[in-house]
Amino acid sequence: MQFINAAQELTYERVKDYLNNSQFKDTMEASEQRPYFALSYQGTTPIELYILPWETHPYPDQAMAIVRASSCVATGCGPELELLRFLLDENRKMRFGSFQTDEAGTVFFANRILGGQHMDPTELEVCLLSVGAIATRYSTMIIDKFGGQRGPNATPTS
């Protein structure tokens, strides 16, 4: 597996160690090609976990990385303008993370934390649990209000 910088590699190893000893250990699948993990929240809500280099940041002399967790909330929802307005309004209420859409109109919920040597395992756990809980809660709400379906196999862009 190739890493862009040492911070990304360190973050990947720390995330992998955390996941191997967490409530996600039985559902975790690690990619052999890229720094990525597939997980399941409460056995029903898939979470994708990317370890990404952070190349444009305020500390030009440091290599940095982030952890990005996301879950597909729904696919095929609409009408688009009403859905987007709803998502923007809900984003304003979120303490951490945000709703996002892709080119196909799939709705995701994602959150990010800073990786590296100071990455906090509790912050990682809260990130994963909040992504899973919010995606689960809003999936039904969005589908009831805007149509569509659950889309656990959709892959968000990183």
Image (tube, rainbow, N blue to C red):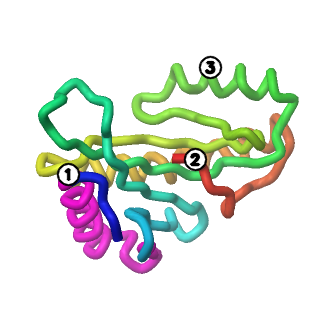
**Of callouts 2 and 1, the N-terminal one:** 1
Which amino acid, by three-letter code, is at mark 3? Answer: Asp
Position in image of residue 136 (x %, y %): 60, 51
Q: Which quarter of the figure is the N terminus placed in? A: bottom left
Left or right for 120, reference 79:
left
Q: Is residue 154 above or below residue 58?
A: below
**Of callouts 3 and 2, the N-terminal one:** 3
Which of the 4 quarters of the picture holds residue 25?
bottom left
Marks 3/2: CA distance? 22 Å
- Secondary structure category for the residue under label 2: loop
Q: Is residue 63 above or below residue 1?
A: above
Judging by the rendered image, the residue that carries numbered circle 1 is: 7
Q: Is residue 29 above or below residue 93?
A: below
Camera-side mark, 3 or 2: 2
Q: Is residue 80 magenta?
A: no
Judging by the rendered image, the residue that carries numbered circle 2 is: 157
For disc 1, the neighbor class at 10 Å (few under 14, some 14 to 19, many from 20) is many
| Residue range corresponding to the magenta coloring | 6-31
Q: How many marks?
A: 3
Residue plotted at (20% across, 51% down) = 7
Left or right for 28, reference 40:
left
Position in image of residue 39 (x %, y %): 48, 67
Which amino acid, by three-letter code, is at mark 2? Answer: Thr
Judging by the rendered image, the residue that carries numbered circle 3 is: 89
